[in-house]
């Protein structure tokens, strides 16, 4: 690959990241939810009432940062700490009804936006882009950081 191609690839990835981040913040702005709160709610939903340790591992957060985040989720009535019935020493994090509803609303808003984006591309180009992105994810997951 030519140096110019590598630079363009790097530039496009950075631009895509920034646009995605900006649009995601736009979607979140109406919900009152922060990006870390959203990511935590997604992780809680996907992992089905994880322990604090499990949630910290998934989110790559230190325990003090995670504690502050879960405190905020509880304060906003999006999640709650519950004792594990199997191990009373363990604390699990559970979505509240409001947390589940707010998460679903944000995810639906994101889907609507992405549907618009894919609609702009048309069905054939959208399929090609999705296939290329799947391949890129696979390669980037497999190739170690130098």
Image: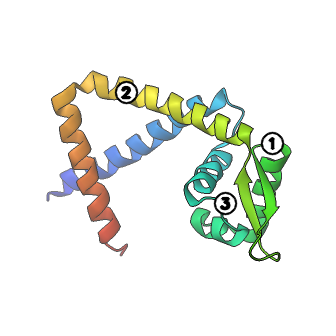
Residue 67, by quadrant, is bottom right
Residue 6, by quadrant, is bottom left
Going by the image, does 113 lie left or right of 34? left
105 and 9: which is toward the camera: 105
**Closer to viewer: mark 3 or mark 1:** 3
Residue 11 versus residue 135 in the image, above or below? above
Is residue 65 visible to the viewer in this orientation of the structure? no
Relative image position of residue 44 (x, y in whole percent): 63, 55
Relative image position of residue 17 (x, y in whole percent): 43, 45
Spatial CA distance of label 2 from label 3 is 30 Å
Query: In which quadrant is the C terminus drawn?
Result: bottom left
Query: In which quadrant is the N terminus drawn?
Result: bottom left
Q: Mark 3 vs mark 1: which is more N-terminal?
A: 3
Quick one: SS at disc 3? Answer: loop
**Closer to viewer: mark 2 or mark 3:** 3
113 and 99: which is toward the camera: 99
Mark 2 — residue?
115
**Closer to viewer: mark 1 or mark 2:** 1
Going by the image, does 72 lie left or right of 22? right
Crowding at mark 1 (Cα within 10 Å: few <14, some 14-19, many 20+): some
Relative image position of residue 49 (x, y in whole percent): 67, 60
Going by the image, does 52 lie left or right of 89? left
Mark 3 — residue?
49
Relative image position of residue 16 (x, y in whole percent): 39, 41
Spatial CA distance of label 1 from label 2 is 30 Å
In percent of the image, x 32 and y 63: which residue is there? 140
Mark 1 — residue?
77
In percent of the image, x 79 and y 53: which residue is there? 80
Q: Mark 2 vs mark 3: which is more N-terminal?
A: 3
Residue 20 versus residue 10 in the image, above or below? above
């Amino acid at each position: 690959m030519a140096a110019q191609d590598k630079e363009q690839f790097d530039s496009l990835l950075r631009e895509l990241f920034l646009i995605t981040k900006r649009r995601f913040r736009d979607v979140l702005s109406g919900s009152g939810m922060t990006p870390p709160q959203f990511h935590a709610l997604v992780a809680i939903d996907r992992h089905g009432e994880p322990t604090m340790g499990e949630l910290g591992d998934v989110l790559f957060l230190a325990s003090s940062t995670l504690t502050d985040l879960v405190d905020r989720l509880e304060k906003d009535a999006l999640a709650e700490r519950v004792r594990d019935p199997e191990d009373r020493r363990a604390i699990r994090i559970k979505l509240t009804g409001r947390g589940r509803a707010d998460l679903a609303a944000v995810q639906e808003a994101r889907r609507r936006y992405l549907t618009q984006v894919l609609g702009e591309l048309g069905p054939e180009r959208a399929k090609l882009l999705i296939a290329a992105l799947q391949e890129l994810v696979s390669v980037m997951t497999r190739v170690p950081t130098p």
